[in-house]
Amino acid sequence: MTGTGSGSRDRTRTAQPRRGRADKATAIVQAACQVFGRDGYSRAGIDAIAAQAGVSTRTIYNHFPGGKAELFRSVMRWSSERVRDEQLAQLRRYLDLERPPHPADLERDLLALARAWVGLMTDFRDHFALVRHIYAEAGHIPADVLDAWQETGPRAVGGEVTSTMAALDELGLIDVHGDPAQATVHFMALISTEITQRSYWGVSPLPQEEADRLTAAGVRTFLRAYGSAS
């Protein structure tokens, strides 16, 4: 019995450093997200990230031996996963295909989804600041990092929206003209592009009334193009 207890305590002692290491890595990633969002990829330095995280530069390299590129990849994956999960949760909330919307309610539901997604620019300011820098600095960011970001976030969300568009088409609620992927591109552009550009990716948010007007106009335009003829 004594030997079993000692072994249990030993396992506990060895498990704790691993949890501590994971917590430290998460703290570094969170701090790096703020610094990359503020300074961009090219200007952000490991020293500034270490200062923000309250650790030494050696600690950062111990966790991320690949330096800034590896850390940025981890930041984008972590941040994109959080936003992706929230976007998908809202997609399922407002367009629940297990209980398809009544045709008369489709505009209402699309508008609720659009407003919720636009609101994420406020809820996840650091993430969208990162995205703004990605578009500005794409030529200076490693291609594999860009691809990892797209695969984790935009492509994953786009795939789910495309499946939803195809399902709405099958239900006769919209007509995607045989191309649900194109309908997805148009929907996402119509509900957010002008708001994104005018607010500089949420840096200078538009008045809520103006943002609501733009999302409503985007949804109406989408339905004029893709609304069911039946």
Image: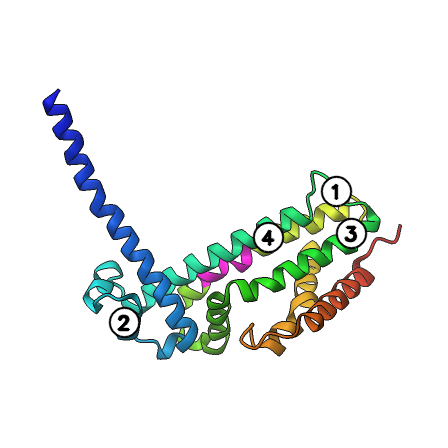
Q: Which residue is mark 3?
A: 106
Q: Which residue is mark 1?
A: 100
**Residue range of the region highlighted in magenta in the rendering:** 147-156
Q: Which residue is mark 2?
A: 51
For badge 2, the amino acid type reads Ala
Within 10 angstroms of label 4, few (less than 14), some, or many (20 or more) residues? Answer: some
CA–CA distance between discs 4 and 2? 38 Å
Q: Nearer the viewer, mark 4 or mark 2?
A: 2
Which residue corresponds to the image point at 73% horizontal and 53% vertical from the top-left? 109
Instruction: Describe the element under mark 1 as helix, strand or loop.
Output: loop
Judged by its main secondary structure, the magenta piece is helix
In the figure, residue 79 lies in which quadrant? bottom left
Contact, mark 4 vs mark 2 (Cβ under 8 Å): no
For badge 4, the amino acid type reads Gly
Q: Nearer the viewer, mark 1 or mark 4?
A: 1
Q: Nearer the viewer, mark 1 or mark 2?
A: 2
For badge 3, the amino acid type reads Leu
Q: Which mark is residue 159?
A: 4
Q: Is residue 38 above or below residue 75?
A: below
Q: Nearer the viewer, mark 2 or mark 3?
A: 2
Which residue corresponds to the image point at 55% horizontal and 57% vertical from the top-left? 155
Q: Quadrant of the N terminus?
A: top left
> How many numbered tags mark residues here?
4
Instruction: Describe the element under mark 4 as helix, strand or loop.
Output: helix
